[in-house]
Image (tube, rainbow, N blue to C red):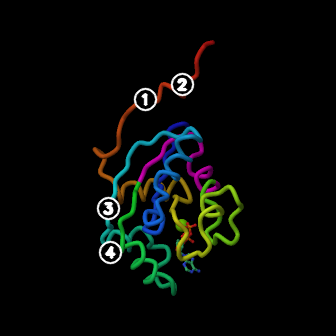
């Protein structure tokens, strides 16, 4: 639906490399609507929940240290199929397998420093948005420039 939402995060390496604007620009220009954004250094407890599906894997601890080094830019983007389109815009988890033209395919080389995160399903998006944002941090606004017009 047109109000689908995804949690998109510029990871610490993306922030360090000055790619925050580039990533926002791609989502904006694709036509998605920004509904929330904040820069934070996430607590370990938050990251343990965010990455709970990977608990027990060998990269879990290094991953949490890296993301927890912060700061990150956490965002919520809204629009038709934003979850799946957002994942396509990000590229594959391993940047070596990401197509040129994708965020990871253009700016990253290794999996452990792949610039940005995007929710992988509608269910994860809801879970992640709830985890990272309070309800009053989500802006309620109408993007008139993307409204269908009669003529
Ligand atoms: P994605 O971020 O594309 O959803 P994921 O959920 O499988 O990928 O993994 C989360 C993050 O963990 C990923 O962006 C980078 C890190 N990661 C995944 N697999 C890894 C691996 N084999 N070695 C090192 N880091 C890995
Ligand atoms: Mg994932």
What residue is rendered at 64% in x and 61% in y?
Answer: 106
Residue 12 lies, in percent from the top left, at: 42, 68
Would you name the residue on which mark 2 appears? 147
Residues at marks 3 and 2 touching, judged by CB atoms closer than 8 Å: no
Q: Is mark 4 within 8 Å of ligand 1?
A: no
Residue picked out by circle 1:
142
**What is the C-alpha distance between the residues marked 3 and 4?**
12 Å
Contact between labelled residues 2 and 1, with CB atoms less than 8 Å apart: yes
Q: Are marks 3 and 1 in contact (CB under 8 Å)?
A: no
Quarter of the picture containing the C terminus is top right
Q: Which residues are magenta?
A: 75-88
Q: Residue at x 45, y 59 (%)?
A: 9
Q: Nearer the viewer, mark 3 or mark 2?
A: 3
* Lower sequence index among marks 3 and 2: 3
Ligand 1 image-quadrant field:
bottom right
**Residue 141 placement (x, y as % from top left):** 39, 32
Residue under the point 35% across and 65% down? 71
**Marks 1 and 2, the one that precedes in the sequence:** 1
Quadrant occupied by the N terminus:
top right
- Disc 2 Cβ-to-ligand 1 distance below 8 Å: no
Question: What residue is shown with label 3?
Answer: 40
Q: Point out which mark residue 44 bears.
A: 4
Spatial separation of the CA atoms under disc 2 and disc 4: 40 Å
Residue in front for this viewpoint, 92 or 39: 39
Within 10 Å of the Cα at label 3, are there few (<14), some (14-19), or many (20+) other Cα atoms?
few
Q: Earlier in the sequence, mark 2 or mark 4?
A: 4
Are the residues at dot 1 and dot 4 in contact (C-beta closer than 8 Å)?
no
Q: Position of residue 43 (x, y in %)?
A: 30, 71
């Amino acid at each position: 639906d047109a109000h689908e939402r995804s949690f998109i995060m510029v990871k610490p390496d993306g922030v360090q490399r000055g790619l925050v604007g580039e990533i926002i620009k791609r989502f904006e220009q694709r036509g998605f609507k920004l509904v929330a954004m904040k820069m934070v250094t996430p607590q370990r407890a938050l990251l343990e929940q965010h990455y709970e599906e990977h608990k027990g894997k060998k990269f879990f601890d290094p991953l949490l240290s890296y993301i927890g080094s912060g700061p990150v830019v956490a965002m919520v983007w809204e629009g038709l199929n934003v979850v799946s389109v957002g994942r396509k815009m990000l590229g594959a988890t391993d940047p070596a397998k990401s197509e040129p033209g994708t965020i990871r395919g253009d700016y990253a080389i290794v999996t452990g420093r792949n610039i940005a995160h995007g929710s992988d399903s509608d269910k994860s998006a809801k879970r992640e948005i709830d985890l990272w944002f309070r309800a009053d941090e989500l802006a309620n606004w109408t993007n008139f420039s993307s409204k269908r017009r009669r003529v």
